[in-house]
């Protein structure tokens, strides 16, 4: 069976992730995919883990708890399992059954520079981890939010300093396509809970 992976570690300030994962799982499995949940325990198997932790844990963020820390860590976990397709658990599959969109070994981000759906080889996932570490010492990619410095894996990808292929396989809600990313911002604009929106997409 075709496989996709999503990374999950609980962040105390966030709620509803297990329910979102279950809706995500249903959407992918009904289209012939197996969703596997991975976490930091997988990344810990890497010989690069401690060096990576030492770097990414110091990067500035305005997001709650270890949210961004785990966004970085998912890349190392994907490298450790041998690469493949990594999705956020708020990406709903409304009809993508073919796997050929993900068959390239090069690193592909399927929503522009937004890493909600990524595919590639283990070597490329690890390369990106190393490039995150290289960029950590460069302040050009930090932004200011409410007078606080902030960066993320998405912001680093947006700098153009990391090599990857951009595709637009994934739509961002409320745009509809075979894969739909239900961003928190879009759900807030719609004034609906993310879980409610994700469940509604199962009925398309």
Image (cartoon, rainbow, N blue to C red):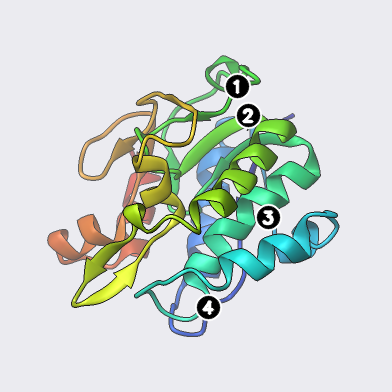
- In three-dimensional space, the C-alpha distance between marks 2 and 3, rounded to whole angstroms, equals 17 Å
Nearer the observer: mark 4 or 1; the answer is 1
Nearer the observer: mark 3 or 4; the answer is 4
Which disc is residue 114 wearing?
Answer: none
Q: Name the residue: 41% across, 48% down.
A: 156
User: How many numbered badges does the structure rendering display?
Assistant: 4
- In three-dimensional space, the C-alpha distance between marks 3 and 4, rounded to whole angstroms, equals 15 Å
Nearer the observer: mark 1 or 3; the answer is 1
User: Foreground residue, 80 or 158?
Assistant: 158
Q: Is residue 132 left or right of residue 16?
A: right
Q: Earlier in the sequence, mark 4 or mark 1?
A: 4
Task: Indicate the secondary structure of the residue bearing disc 4.
Answer: loop
Q: Are marks 2 and 1 in contact (CB under 8 Å)?
A: yes
Q: Are marks 2 and 3 in contact (CB under 8 Å)?
A: no
Q: Which of the 4 image quarters holds residue 199?
A: bottom left
Q: Which of the 4 image quarters holds residue 112?
A: top left
User: Foreground residue, 178 or 201?
Assistant: 178
- In three-dimensional space, the C-alpha distance between marks 4 and 1, rounded to whole angstroms, equals 31 Å
Give the quadrant of the N terminus: top right
User: Foreground residue, 77 or 169?
Assistant: 77
Nearer the observer: mark 2 or 3; the answer is 2
> Neighbour class for label 3 at 10 Å: few (<14), some, many (≥20)?
some
- In three-dimensional space, the C-alpha distance between marks 1 and 3, rounded to whole angstroms, equals 23 Å
Q: Which residue is mark 2?
A: 120
Q: Earlier in the sequence, mark 3 or mark 4?
A: 4
Task: Indicate the secondary structure of the residue bearing disc 2.
Answer: strand
Q: Which residue is mark 3?
A: 37
Q: Which residue is mark 4?
A: 11
Q: Name the residue: 73% across, 62% down.
A: 51
- In three-dimensional space, the C-alpha distance between marks 2 and 1, rounded to whole angstroms, equals 5 Å
Q: Earlier in the sequence, mark 2 or mark 3?
A: 3
């Amino acid at each position: 069976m075709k496989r996709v992976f999503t990374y999950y570690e609980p962040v105390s300030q966030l709620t509803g992730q297990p329910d979102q994962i279950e809706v995500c799982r249903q959407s992918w499995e009904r289209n012939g995919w197996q969703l596997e949940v991975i976490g930091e325990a997988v990344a810990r198997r890497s010989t690069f883990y401690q060096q990576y932790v030492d770097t990414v844990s110091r990067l500035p963020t305005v997001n709650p708890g270890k949210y961004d820390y785990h966004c970085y860590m998912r890349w190392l976990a994907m490298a450790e399992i041998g690469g493949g397709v990594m999705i956020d658990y708020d990406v709903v599959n409304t009809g993508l059954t073919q796997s050929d969109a993900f068959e390239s070994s090069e690193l592909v981000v399927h929503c522009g520079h937004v890493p909600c759906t990524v595919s590639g080889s283990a070597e490329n996932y690890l390369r990106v981890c190393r490039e995150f570490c290289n960029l950590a010492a460069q302040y050009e990619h930090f932004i200011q939010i409410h007078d606080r410095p902030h960066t993320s894996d998405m912001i680093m990808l947006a700098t153009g300093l990391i090599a990857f292929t951009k595709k637009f396989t994934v739509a961002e809600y409320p745009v509809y396509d075979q894969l739909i990313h239900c961003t928190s911002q879009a759900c807030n604009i719609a004034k609906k809970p993310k879980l409610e929106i994700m469940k509604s997409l199962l009925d398309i």
